[in-house]
């Protein structure tokens, strides 16, 4: 399997007033195509910063990050946005849906930035909502959907540009256990279909779904 993502001796130091806060202190991670990886750690361990690095949402203070052939640690924001829009789909704990847009419009939105025409956007969005079991809810606003349904919309949205990597940040954090298990089942199925899944969580019970677990403490990979 080819390497999709690699962090090499990645440091992230935030300058806050007169204090330097070290979030990552020499992080090394390698993720291969088709893996289902869980990144776990307690609050303050550096897992959220690691997610931002993997997701091209931030650049390191020092060290190197590769997304396939791209050394993203050297890229500007506009180029980072272009790459993550094509390569990475995001699923967030708080869903991050736009409340004034329907489920269909929320799923179609990322394709707008990739210059896909409207008819094709809508067809793909409908197919994805059908895939996650929301065929009857496509015209509903987020406020008219349950938490589980909103997360299904978020999963469909993450797939809209057919990315290689799905990055899930606490994907069941706002859900009851039954709905959470259903969402994890969807992620498992996506992995079986060939998507690389990277899940960031503090919930040890979710690690059973992953094929590999990376443990983070004090800004370093301590196992996995």
Image (cartoon, rainbow, N blue to C red):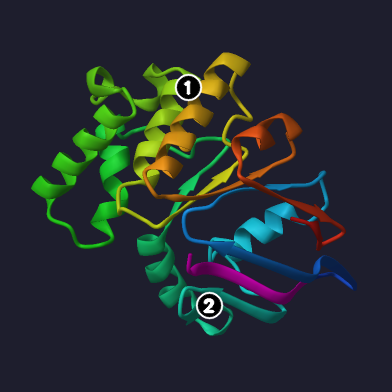
Q: Relative to the observer, which residue lies in front, 157 or 144?
A: 157
Residue 177 numbered tag: none
* Relative vertical location of residue 55 with respect to residue 130 in this rendering, above or below: below
Where is residue 128 shown, x and y percent of the image?
27, 36
- Residue for point 43% across, 27% down: 150
| Helix, strand or loop status at disc 2 | helix
* Relative vertical location of residue 23 with respect to residue 196 in this rendering, above or below: below
Where is residue 138 shown, x and y percent of the image?
25, 26
**In what quadrant of the picture does the C terminus appear?**
bottom right
Regarding residue 65, the answer to whether it shows in the image is yes
Regarding residue 98, the answer to whether it shows in the image is no
Q: Earlier in the sequence, mark 1 or mark 2?
A: 2
| Mark 1 crowdedness (10 Å alpha carbons): few <14, some 14-19, many ≥20 | some
Image side of residue 197 versus residue 122, left or right: right
Which contiguous range is marked in magenta? 1-13
In magenta stretch: residue 9:
yes
Q: CA distance from mark 1 to mark 2?
A: 33 Å
Q: Quadrant of residue 46?
A: bottom right
Image side of residue 140 versus residue 49, left or right: left
- Residue for point 64% across, 80% down: 64
Image side of residue 58 versus residue 27, left or right: left
For disc 2, the marked residue is 72
Our reading of the magenta stretch's main secondary structure is strand
Looking at the image, which residue sits at the far bottom?
74
Q: Relative to the observer, which residue lies in front, 142 or 190?
A: 190
For disc 1, the marked residue is 148
């Amino acid at each position: 399997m080819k390497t999709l993502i690699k962090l090499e001796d990645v440091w992230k130091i935030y300058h806050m007033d007169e204090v330097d806060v070290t979030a990552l202190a020499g992080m090394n991670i390698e993720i291969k195509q088709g893996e289902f990886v869980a990144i776990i750690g307690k609050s303050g361990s550096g897992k959220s910063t690691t997610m931002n690095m993997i997701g091209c949402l931030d650049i390191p203070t020092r060290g190197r990050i590769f997304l396939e052939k791209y050394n993203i640690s050297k890229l500007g924001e506009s180029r980072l946005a272009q790459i993550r829009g094509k390569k990475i789909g995001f699923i967030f704990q708080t869903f991050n849906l736009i409340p004034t847009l329907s489920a269909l419009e929320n799923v179609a939105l990322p394709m707008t930035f990739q210059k896909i025409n409207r008819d094709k956007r809508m067809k793909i969005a409908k197919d994805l909502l059908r895939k996650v079991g929301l065929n009857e809810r496509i015209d509903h606003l987020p406020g008219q959907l349950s938490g589980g349904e909103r997360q299904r919309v978020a999963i469909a949205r993450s797939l809209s540009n057919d990315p290689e990597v799905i990055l899930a940040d606490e994907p069941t954090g706002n859900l009851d256990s039954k709905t959470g298990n259903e969402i994890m089942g969807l992620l498992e199925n996506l992995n079986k279909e060939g998507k690389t899944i990277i899940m960031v969580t503090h919930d040890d019970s979710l690690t059973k779904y992953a094929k590999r677990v990376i443990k983070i403490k004090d800004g370093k990979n301590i196992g996995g």
